[in-house]
Image (cartoon, rainbow, N blue to C red):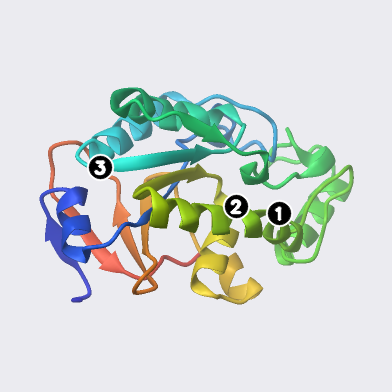
């Protein structure tokens, strides 16, 4: 398939693939995302920008013949998926294993303006090695996240095979490890996957390919490209 192609709708692209796919979205921006607070598993609602991103995702998915919808138990993923769930009368299946990585006592801290130098240095050491370093107070590293999402990934692929196109609305770090499992990436490669609020990944299991599209404003064509985005 060419590097990038334009389609009138996501369903048009899925029809061309001629197979059921897994659609992987990230929740819309939360109120804490918007003010640079470390979030982890704190249960924060969508921000005004997050509601706009939810609307854009809704219209992107509206033409798609979805069969199943999975989210975490945190409200930002549920709020993101709720309109398409209600429109298509597909119940949301909430999974604790999809909750974002725990970030311990640093949840609620400002990412830029730390309250003290000790905390700033400790958080930087975590950012330098998110695969192995755990923040104190119950934090998780990416190895731990990877272990808890292995079984859900199998469940998602079974849902695609038995039911049809399946939507998963997750979190940035969880989605990194979902992508790692889908594509057989190393932990380092999985860590380098980027998943912004306005991006959707489409995984075609029969051909084992991942595709990327930006979730734009309603009523516009969509551009699909193979592969995934990496962090800067």
Q: Closer to the N terminus: mark 3 or mark 2? A: 3
How much space separates mark 1 and mark 3, taking CA atoms?
29 Å
How much space separates mark 3 and mark 2, taking CA atoms?
22 Å
Q: Could you tell me residue 17's position as x and y percent?
A: 22, 65
Q: Could you tell me residue 140's position as x and y percent?
A: 78, 52
Q: Residue at x 72, y 60 (%)?
A: 147
Q: Which mark is residue 219?
A: none
> Observer-nearest residue: 215 or 8?
8
Q: Could you tell me residue 9's position as x and y percent?
A: 15, 48
- Where the N terminus falls, by quadrant? bottom left
**Viewer-nearest of labels 1 and 3?**
3
> Observer-nearest residue: 228 or 145?
145
* Residue where numbered disc 2 is placed: 152
* Residue where numbered disc 1 is placed: 148
Residue 85 in sight in this render: yes
Q: Which mark is residue 65?
A: 3
Q: Residues within 10 Å of mark 1 (few under 14, many from 20)?
A: some
Q: Residues within 10 Å of mark 3 (few under 14, many from 20)?
A: some
């Amino acid at each position: 398939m060419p590097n990038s192609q334009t389609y009138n709708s996501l369903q048009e692209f899925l029809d061309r693939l001629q197979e059921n796919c897994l659609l992987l979205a990230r929740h819309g921006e939360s109120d804490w995302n918007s003010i640079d607070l470390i979030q982890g598993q704190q249960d924060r609602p969508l921000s005004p920008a997050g509601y706009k991103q939810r609307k854009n995702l809704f219209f992107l998915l509206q033409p798609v013949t979805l069969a199943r919808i999975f989210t975490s138990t945190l409200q930002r993923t549920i709020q993101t998926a709720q309109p398409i769930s209600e429109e298509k009368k597909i119940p949301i299946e909430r999974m604790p294993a999809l909750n974002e990585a725990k970030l311990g006592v640093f949840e609620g801290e400002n990412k830029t303006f730390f309250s003290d130098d000790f905390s700033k240095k400790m958080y930087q050491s975590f950012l330098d090695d998110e695969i192995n370093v755990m923040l104190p107070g119950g934090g998780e590293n990416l190895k731990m996240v990877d272990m808890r999402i292995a079984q859900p990934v199998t469940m998602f692929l079974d849902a695609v095979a038995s039911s049809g196109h399946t939507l998963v609305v997750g979190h940035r770090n969880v989605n990194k490890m979902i992508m790692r499992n889908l594509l057989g990436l190393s932990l380092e490669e999985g860590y380098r996957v980027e998943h912004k609020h306005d991006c959707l990944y489409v995984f075609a299991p029969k051909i084992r390919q991942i595709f990327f599209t930006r979730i734009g404003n309603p009523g516009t064509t969509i551009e699909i490209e193979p592969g995934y985005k990496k962090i800067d």
